[in-house]
Image (spheres, grey):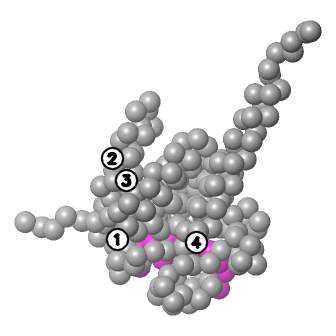
Amino acid sequence: AAAARPKVHASFATRMNSATMQSVTQQVHAAGCEWTTDHIQTEAWFKEWSRKAREADFLLVLFTPEYKNLFSWALEREADKIRQIHERNGTPVYIFEPMHITGLNAPPDTNGLPACEHPGCALHQCALGQTRNLPYHKPAEIGANLRERVPTMGAYHAWVKFCDVKKQADSTAAGAVAAAVTPYQSQ
């Protein structure tokens, strides 16, 4: 019997660039892996998404401009689950960032640029060495890293910080809205 192909499960904004999505899925398949993020977002979507995430050999966050600009409660739930699975099981997390928006997701210690976090990797380098001149990933890097079974890709800590800041901003905004709609009580 043939060995099971490694499973790759992803989190992404539904309105992301279709050409980027197609390139990413092609790279996953070309690396001999199975793309498991083909399901319809129904009322029970998160249960199915979470099951597939727990079964995955690699978790992939498509940290695109759409993800950053349209960060929703659904992406927040997926982010929390990815972090939980990574911390509990050590499942590799790849942060694919094809475009960087200065100040939106950069930690203060990288001068506004995302840093790859491969062991021993210098700023703007992936595990395969200097592969690009800009701090952006190309879909081919996903494929190359999956083929080599690299344990990490991209700026994981910058993504975590982005999610935490967005979650904090959302809870602060929700509190302000709740205070604004509280009915006035006359004395």
Q: The disc labelled 2 sits on which kind of residue?
A: Arg
Secondary structure beneath disc 1? Answer: helix
What label does residue 100 carry, if any?
Answer: none
72 relative to 159, above or below? above
Task: Give the residue pinned by disc 4.
Answer: 155
Q: Name the front one of labels 4 and 1.
A: 4
* Residue at mark 2 to residue at mark 1: CA–CA distance: 24 Å
Which badge, 1 or 3, comes first in the chain's sequence? Answer: 1
Q: The disc labelled 3 sits on which kind of residue?
A: Ala
Which badge, 3 or 4, comes first in the chain's sequence? Answer: 3
Q: Residues within 10 Å of mark 2 (few under 14, many from 20)?
A: few
Task: Give the residue pinned by disc 3.
Answer: 53
Secondary structure beneath disc 3? Answer: helix
* Residue ID at (38%, 67%): 90
* Residue at mark 4 to residue at mark 1: CA–CA distance: 24 Å
Which badge, 4 or 1, comes first in the chain's sequence? Answer: 1
Q: Give the range drawn in magenta.
A: 133-144
